[in-house]
């Protein structure tokens, strides 16, 4: 009787291993309740359980909440990133020119995931290169202005240059001819402080960039297909892209592997 009263006061009930002490822990994987490290180790050994949450386990609909949904969304992003990493690591280096091998290696040294597709249209347009004399990467950058058909390309942009200094001319009326000037009037009116920069990922989403950062800093821990493609969006339209923003995962920095 006393045991039942005490159990009702304890949210987890009694330890399911020794059945004598109040449970303090609940296994994230099999949900067995335990009271001590000793009982935790016994349950792991007897049930062959690693104690790690089962990310793809079945969850009843009535127990599926916002937290579970966010976990599934994070897991999906991890899978997408893992596939991208696998493609990058298994890419046939023999198909790349010496210049592109050098560029990709130097990008990797800067914690940038650079994916290069030999013989593709993007690859033919890729004018980015590494200059060993100054130990700097010079990037090709494509700019697209949301809601218009206006596109610009910068070549040989040094990695230490800030994004806002590169794009500043696009927000002046003097830079555009008459036809483009009409299309860009809202951007010119908003100015560079009235827009956001979104860089395209290979996964159909976008990284949000800080215009005050240098190219090198902006690209850290991000995946790029050939060269940066930046979508310029008026700040008042930012909410339209909330579901398309990529949730960054810094595991790239913690799981480096040697690139040949």
Image (cartoon, helix red, strand yellow):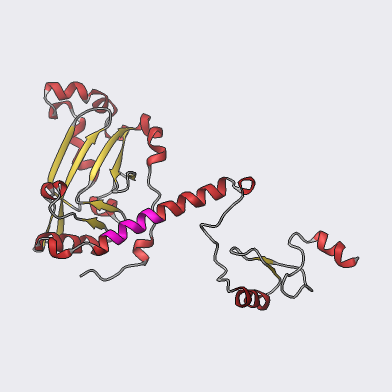
Q: Residue 213, position in %: x, y?
A: 28, 48
Q: Residue 150, position in %: x, y?
A: 19, 30
Q: Is residue 176 left or right of residue 13?
A: left
Is residue 2 inside the magenta stretch?
A: no
At a point 36% along the width and 59% down the height, the residue shown is 82
**Which range of residues does the magenta coloring cover?**
79-87
In the rendered image of this protein, does residue 137 appear above or below residue 232? Answer: below
The residue lying toward the viewer, choosing from 6 and 19, is 19
The residue lying toward the viewer, choosing from 226 and 120, is 120
In the rendered image of this protein, does residue 20 appear above or below residue 233? Answer: below
- Is any part of residue 247 visible from this angle? yes
Q: Check the picture and name the quadrant holding the N terminus.
A: bottom right
Q: Main secondary structure of the magenta part?
A: helix
At a point 74% along the width and 70% down the height, the residue shown is 15
The residue lying toward the viewer, choosing from 158 and 41, is 41
Is residue 80 inside the magenta stretch?
A: yes
């Amino acid at each position: 009787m006393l045991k039942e009263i005490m159990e009702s006061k304890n949210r987890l009930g009694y330890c399911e291993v020794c059945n004598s002490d109040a449970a303090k822990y609940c296994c994230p994987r099999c949900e067995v309740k335990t009271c001590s490290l000793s009982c935790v180790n016994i349950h792991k050994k007897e049930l062959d359980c690693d104690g790690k949450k089962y990310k793809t386990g079945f969850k009843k609909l009535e127990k599926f909440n916002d937290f579970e949904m966010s976990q599934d969304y994070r897991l999906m992003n991890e899978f997408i990133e893992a596939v991208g990493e696998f493609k990058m690591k298994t890419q046939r280096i023999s198909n790349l020119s010496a210049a592109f091998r050098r560029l990709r290696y130097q990008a990797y040294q800067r914690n940038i995931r650079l994916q290069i597709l030999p013989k593709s249209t993007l690859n033919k347009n890729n004018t980015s290169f590494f200059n060993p004399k100054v130990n700097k990467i010079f990037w090709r950058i494509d700019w697209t202005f949301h809601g218009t058909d206006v596109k610009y390309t910068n070549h040989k942009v040094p990695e230490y240059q800030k994004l806002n200094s590169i794009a500043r001319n696009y927000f002046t009326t003097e830079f555009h001819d008459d036809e483009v000037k009409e299309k860009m009037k809202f951007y010119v009116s908003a100015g560079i402080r009235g827009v956001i920069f979104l860089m395209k990922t290979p996964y159909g989403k976008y990284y949000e960039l800080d215009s005050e950062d240098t190219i090198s800093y902006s690209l850290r821990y991000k995946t790029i297909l050939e060269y940066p493609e930046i979508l310029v969006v008026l700040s008042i339209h930012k909410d339209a892209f909330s579901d398309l923003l990529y949730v960054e995962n810094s595991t790239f920095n913690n799981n480096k592997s040697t690139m040949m």
